[in-house]
Image: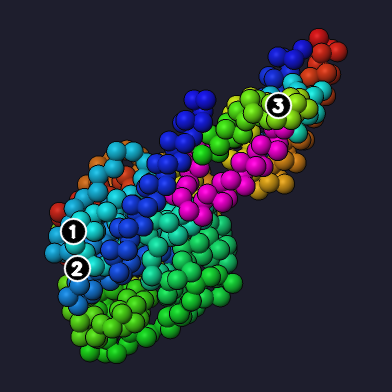
Amino acid sequence: MLVLLLTSVFLLSLLAEKAWHRRRLRALPLRIGVTGTRGKSTVTRLLASVLREDGRRVLAKTTGSEARLILPDGSEVEIRRRGIPTILEQKGLVRRAVRAGADCLVAEMMSIRPENLFVEAHHLLQPNVVAVTNVRADHTEAMGNRPDQVGAALAPAFHPRAAVFVPQSSVRYFGSATGSIEPVPAGISSPLTATHPQLQRQEFQGDLDLVYQVARRLGVSGEVIARGIGKARHDLGRLALWILERGSRRLYLVNAFSANDPESTWEALDKARALLPDSTALAGILNLRSDRPGRTLQWLSELRSGGLGRFAQLYVTGGHAVAARRSVRGLRRIGRASPEEITETVASGLPDRGILFGFGNMAGAGRLIVEYWKRVGEPYAL
Amino acid sequence: MPYELSFVGLLASLAYISITGIHPGGVIVPSYLVVFLSRPSRLAATLAIALLTLLCYRLASRHLILFGSRRFAFMVLVAAVWTFLGYRIFPALVPASIEFQAIGWVIPGLISNTCERQGIWLTLASLATVTVAAFFLGRALGTII
């Protein structure tokens, strides 16, 4: 009989949880879920800032390089986790938003596995707006290698009653996905960037287009969108540039550790090059994570198929560094070293106006290096 | 050698997972099933409860927040309820059902959980393959030793 009792208690607690959660969701008229491969934290922050500027009480949450709650007054609270991140955080997020009197929730969706993404979208957040940043190959073990596989893995985020915004170039990867997909044409934010050219310099075009289209659909004016984007605060994972003076040499430090996948990384490199027209040689620091074997394999394949040629020197550090050096000729390994030693080692071989480009993963050495660069470098361009 | 067969089942299961990457209903499940290969009614009851539990999950997951460890707990508990009914209630109603009882309390739940994650046919086909392979391997080893 005990098994009957335990099962009954378990099911009743699940039913009660669902009822309470549904009641809280009803108290939040606008719920925006941000998903995609890259740029989710940035788009979440931009959308929250724009809607705040529009006079709404917005609670937002990012889960990328730094998990943060962004409160209605724009201040931030670090999310402390006792164990492995779980999508049940989104239940607490909804509760917190209701308690804070928010009328709008902007949440970065955190699931990688499609079955979890389905639960996150259909039960926990039930977004009425879903914004997809892009469709690229990352987390390949869970999402697949091909764009159509990644699209299929992201499609469970589309709640049937949600307006879904997808970059026009990526719509084809979603096949017969449910929800009303609204394509976001590339360059749709041009009215905004024409009057505020600094935004194009600060942000990636795709992020601007997506935020602009979503905000316009929510009735926000162009001027408010521009002000909101301008006021947005970003986290450590954002593409950032610094100048480092070393004797007679001026070096450029570029943080692209959070770009993670090759396609996003090369996009970040192109943007950095465009912002640094006088730059010369390029040296890279590739930070690998032992708990991201799929990403390591992706990078090794990319480097072997020509990616290594972009760099005058490329150093590798982190969990799979030894295996990576064996696998790709020309890679140099940096063992256990402080961020200062890593920076000096890589910088020593660079000429004046050379770029020191950090990429791969933020966790571990990436974060330490970026924190060091923030301390010793002078912010540049962005 | 019934209890030794369980260990053969465990190793066969491990080898199968290593080679194919497919789980035969859980690493330990073939170890139990192979011992009961001579009692098909119990095998049938185990699979029937696993599928019934999977149906319950599919219905419940439309309304409840079920994923990861919650889904696992749901599968094991609901399967245990069906197993309990099979032991206590059904034989009183239909005496012929006394032979139609599940193997263990947790095994049907493990099978249904794997079916949900991996697909029904892939799981059941793998489970049958590993169980039968373990049976013949066990017999062959018994002959040699």
Residue drawn at (80%, 24%) of the image: B39
Single out the mark in the foreground, 1 or 3. 3
- Neighbor class of circle 3 (other Cα within 10 Å; few <14, some 14-19, many 20+) is some
- Looking at this view, is A164 or A255 the one in front? A164
Residue under mark 2: which chain is it in?
Answer: A
Dots 1 and 2: beta carbons under 8 Å?
Answer: yes
Checking the image for residue A57, the label placed there is: 2
Name the colour scheme.
rainbow
Checking the image for residue A100, the label placed there is: 1
Q: Are marks 2 and 3 on the same chain?
A: no
Residue under mark 3: which chain is it in?
Answer: B
Q: Amino acid at mark 3?
A: Pro
- Looking at this view, is A30 or A232 the one in front? A30
Q: Quadrant of residue A188?
A: bottom left
Q: Quadrant of residue B90?
A: top right
Please tell me whether residue A279 is drawn above or below residue A304 in the rendered image: below
Residue drawn at (34%, 78%) of the image: A214
Residue drawn at (42%, 41%) of the image: A12
Quadrant the N terminus of chain B occupies: top right
Disc 1/disc 3 C-alpha distance (Å): 56 Å
